[in-house]
Amino acid sequence: MAKRLTKIYTRTGDDGTTGLADGKRVGKDSLRVAVMGDVDELNSILGVLIASGVGEDIAGYLLNIQHRLFDIGAELSVPGKQVTQPAHISRLEELLDTYNEDLKPLDEFILPGGTLSGALCHFARTVCRRAERSMVKLARAEYLNPNTLSYINRLSDLLFVFSRAITQAKGGKEVYWDKDRLKQSV
């Protein structure tokens, strides 16, 4: 494999622009670059989640998802490119069904918490939702692979289910929203 980054700084971005993979230069504040940043942030928080000590099975799936997010970043860096396919979405749905099967049905809303890893997974879910909102905005302004938007939407659902599964596996208790709690507070 050839060395991709032999020099970390190039000074080409000092003027507030960055290069897309197709060679075009755009403002660092462009919508496309913002979406790429949201996906990068999501990838980073998934790394933190893995490092927090989730089970091997979920850690493996999250690592695969990190690779897929890297591919999505590349897809975003080449306007019009399509990497995400319906099969990728179907795989997330399979994981959702598998992990949700062993979870107690919900009667209340869940607050982030229960265990550190479970809370971090909820945090990743919220970052994923922000990336999704950014993608919707980008899709209204220019072309975005609809499969990518569906993948990110399904991923946020999977992160919700993973947070519950992680909390359960670690023996934690889910924290439920209590509509009456604030009536008793000072």
Image (cartoon, rainbow, N blue to C red):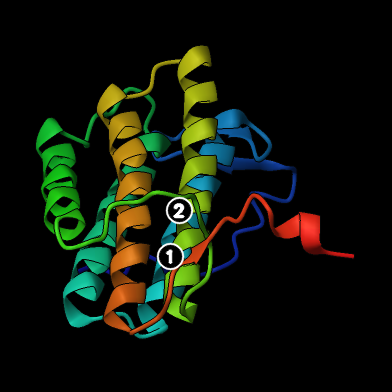
Task: Measure the C-alpha gap from mark 1 to mark 2.
Answer: 6 Å
- Residue at image position (35%, 56%) is 159
Residue 166's place in the image compared with 123, above or below, is below
Give the crowd class for mark 2: few <14, some 14-19, many >=20 residues within 10 Å. Answer: many
- Residue at image position (65%, 40%) is 28
Image location (x, y in percent) of residue 52: 42, 83
Looking at the rendered structure, the secondary structure element under dot 2 is: helix
Looking at the rendered structure, the secondary structure element under dot 1 is: helix
- Residue at image position (20%, 65%) is 61
| 57 relative to 165 in the view: left or right | left
In the image, 75 versus 21, the foreground residue is 75
In the image, 167 versus 147, the foreground residue is 167
Q: Which residue is mark 2?
A: 125
Q: Which residue is mark 1?
A: 121
In the image, 177 versus 165, the foreground residue is 177
| 61 relative to 122 in the view: left or right | left
Residue 74 seen by the camera: no
